[in-house]
Image (cartoon, rainbow, N blue to C red):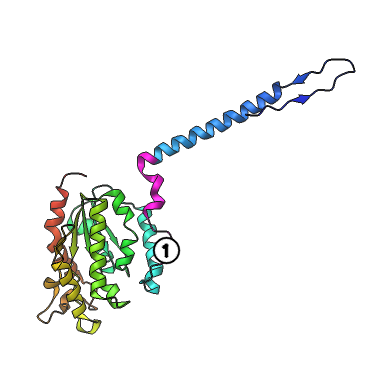
Amino acid sequence: MSIHTRLMPRPSGTPLVVKTSQVYEKDETRMMDHMRKSLTSIALLVLALSTGSLYAEDLYPPKDLVISTHSKWAAGHYPRRIAVFRTHPLATNDIVFIGDSITEYGGDWAKRLNIKTVKNRGISGDVTAGILARMNELYHYRPKALFVLIGINDLLATQQSPKYIAENTIKISDLMHKNSPGTIVYVQTMLPISQKRGNLQAIRTANRILREHNNPSYKLIDLYSHFADEAGYMKKEYSGDGVHLTPAGYKLWASLIQKRAEAAVGTPAQ
């Protein structure tokens, strides 16, 4: 703290008198204000550290992030959905469903499975690269289980190869295992599509790679065979447009993963 002095007028021949008391009082007041502000900042810092809110901005992708394989529509929807996640964060030991519109349109997965800790992290239009860009939230909250279903937009929107889709899906699992080793990762096979919607063989190839890849970081759930008809295409009762699911489709999906989700609830807290 610097101390400023003020020279007072004096008659000729009188000694020089330096008045500092008023300056001291002003400086002391200024110092006390500064200390109060500092203590308040420290208190807020401690609170942020204890709640994890200090790093909230680091948990989610920036608003201006560009995913090269997003469609124009997805590029607009992605940040809006991320904004929802910011205001409704996960909790430690949740069970998380992550994916694209097929997951997002499942709505309230907690109600669907009758498990209150289940959270929906689906983003319509999302791709494998989009999930890879938003995994910090998962690393931070360490869910008990992560159910992954992704890849259809990589295939239909930007014509990525089955190898690309499978390798990115495996990368999601590997990174999750590395950063949250207690999380059980369930990779679900891509669903079939209708004959008019595109390349069914590419889906089968991606699923085969996931099935044959000897990787302890994830457990594979075969959804494809339960939704496919004899020719391998999506059964009409499970999809109205050949990609997205009907209520009957969501009912079937929930039945196929119900026991695994319930088992995850009973796993020890991380």
Task: Please provide percent x and percent y for residue 244.
Answer: 24, 73
**Disc 1 packing (10 Å; few <14; some 14–19; many ≥20):** few
Residue drawn at the location 29% of the way across and 51% of the way down: 139
| Quadrant for the C terminus in the image | top left
Q: Which of 145 and 168 is in front in this view?
A: 168
Instruction: Pick out the residue farthest to the front.
Output: 214
* Tag 1: amino acid: Leu
Relative to 116, does residue 26 appear above or below in the rendering? Answer: above
Q: Which of 170 and 50 is in front in this view?
A: 170
Relative to 17, does residue 167 appear above or below in the rendering? Answer: below
Magenta stretch: give its range: 49-66
Task: For mark 1, give the secondary structure.
Answer: loop
Q: Is residue 70 covered in magenta?
A: no
* Residue picked out by circle 1: 65
Task: Please provide percent x and percent y for residue 7.
Answer: 79, 24
Q: Which of 237 and 79 is in front in this view?
A: 79
Q: In which quarter of the image is residue 214?
A: bottom left
Q: In this view, does 34 lie to the left or right of 220?
A: right
Residue drawn at the location 35% of the way across and 41% of the way down: 51
Task: Please provide percent x and percent y for residue 138.
Answer: 29, 53
Residue drawn at the location 40% of the way across and 38% of the way down: 47
Q: Is residue 61 covered in magenta?
A: yes
Residue drawn at the location 15% of the way across and 72% of the way down: 208
| Quadrant for the N terminus in the image | top right
Q: In which quarter of the image is residue 46?
A: top left
Instruction: Pick out the residue farthest to the bottom.
Output: 196
Instruction: Pick out the residue farthest to the top.
Output: 14
Asked whether residue 18 appears in the rendered view, the answer is yes
Asked whether residue 119 appears in the rendered view, the answer is no
Q: In this view, does 219 lie to the left or right of 28?
A: left
